[in-house]
Amino acid sequence: MVNPETAPKSEKLLSPEDQRCWEIFHRSKDGMVREFQVIGAIASDYKRWGVDDASREVHKEIIRAAREGDVEKRIEDELNPDGTISRMGIVRKSDGATLVEQRIYNTEGDEPKYDFEQIHDYIQKGVIDENEALQLALAFGILNGVDSPTGLNQRDFRRNLGQIKEKIIRYYNREYQKALFKDDGEDRDGLHHEVIDGEIPLVCFDGADFKMLVHVRDAMHTVQGERDGTNLLEGDPKRAWTSPRPGKDKIPHGLSTSLISSENINIYMNGEIIFGFTEIEDDSIVTMSEEDCGSSTSARSRFSITGNHGNERLMLPDELLAKTGRPDAMSNFNEVVLDRFADGSYGETEKLIMPSCLVVFGSDVSAVTDLQKHYAKSFDIPIYLIDDSKYGGVHSLGDA
């Protein structure tokens, strides 16, 4: 029996289904649905909750306010008695106005469906074997009320499910490793190399294909500097990257990025400092969504980097890009959440993920600012100058 005093906050008033799931999986039913959804074991058209058109616009306004530093306070989400969240994204703006985003939960009858086709695809590709597929099917059955087998060793069962999940996550990481742009140093149609300021490599894209992950510095506040007016040209960007933020004791695990390509440059905002990532480890990517997924970028472990928008699902690069920028989406950009510490370690800065390049959008070298040069020198990385006029332009939240 679950002790409501020791159960997590969202588990304290458990339904019978949640209690059974908590006893076997150490997760609520919704928590387990999220786990299955992320690894693709649930049909892709299922969402644990959604929003109406009005709340979708509120969500976009909340993102704008956060981007512009216009959020005075983020108010705690409101919980229903069964632990589900009834209101999310509650913020108070600087002018005192409150923005409240309402979530609509799926009704009973709209239960998630097990994606046998996706699991079969994993088997065919050698991601998991048939026995592991059966373990997933057994877990999904238990999730939906089927009695667990007599004598089931719950601890071993949970460990096996965790290992299966990690195998699937690593599969997607490998697919992104293969898909991301790799610079071989050679000029070709639509791409050439220069050196600026006598020491900074410049890779110029004016038609060549590419895919890369990008992270806008301080996107939720400002990319020109901290609110206290710090002069970024006087600081050491690499040292700041490898140190905890002021007032914090550790570097967080979560790092929000977006996948962009020569066919789809949809980002959160077009800031002055945009880090690019073209080299990742086997377990760098933790989760993703074709929209903003509300991930925790202050997560203290890779296991707490979760989204709160109910839309996380691992996807292959081309699939993610094809779904990004839909007009009915929560946002016009995708989110690919990385673990800053590539192997899940904590606090060892030598294992911290580092940017591969600095991304600048512009037609010629005059688009590169002194601050961007300063960052490139500090990190000892090239600048990727992307002539966005050759790729259909940059589409960011600021354009919405």
Image (cartoon, rainbow, N blue to C red):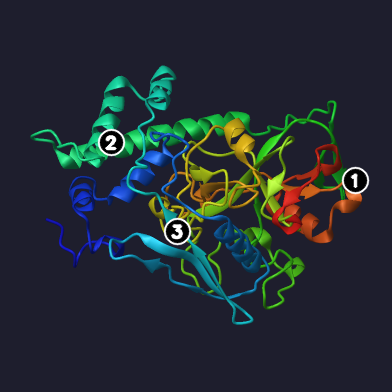
- How would you rate the neighbour count of disc 1 (Cα within 10 Å): few for under 14, some for 14-19, many for 20 or more? some
Q: Quadrant of the N terminus?
A: bottom left
The residue where tag 2 is placed is: 140
The residue where tag 1 is placed is: 364
Which image quadrant for residue 262? top right
Mark 3 and mark 2: span between their CA atoms? 27 Å
Badge 1 or badge 2: first in the primary sequence? 2
- Residue 381 on image: x %, y %: 71, 47
Element under label 3? loop
Mark 1 and mark 2: span between their CA atoms? 54 Å
Q: Quadrant of the C terminus?
A: bottom right
Residue depth check, mark 1 versus mark 2: number of the one nearer the observer: 2
Instruction: Left or right? Give the position of 44 relative to 30.
Output: right
Badge 3 or badge 1: first in the primary sequence? 3
Compared to 246, does 188 lie above or below? above
- How would you rate the neighbour count of disc 3 (Cα within 10 Å): few for under 14, some for 14-19, many for 20 or more? some
Instruction: Left or right? Give the position of 294 relative to 105.
Output: right
| Amino acid of disc 3 | Ala
The residue where tag 3 is placed is: 299
| Amino acid of disc 1 | Asp
Compared to 140, does 61 lie above or below? below
Q: Residue at x 52, y 47 (%)?
A: 338
| 124, 398: nearer the viewer | 398
Work out which residue is located at the far left of the displayed protein and give it.
151
Q: Which mark is residue 65?
A: none
| 148, 271: nearer the viewer | 148
Element under label 2? helix
Element under label 1? loop
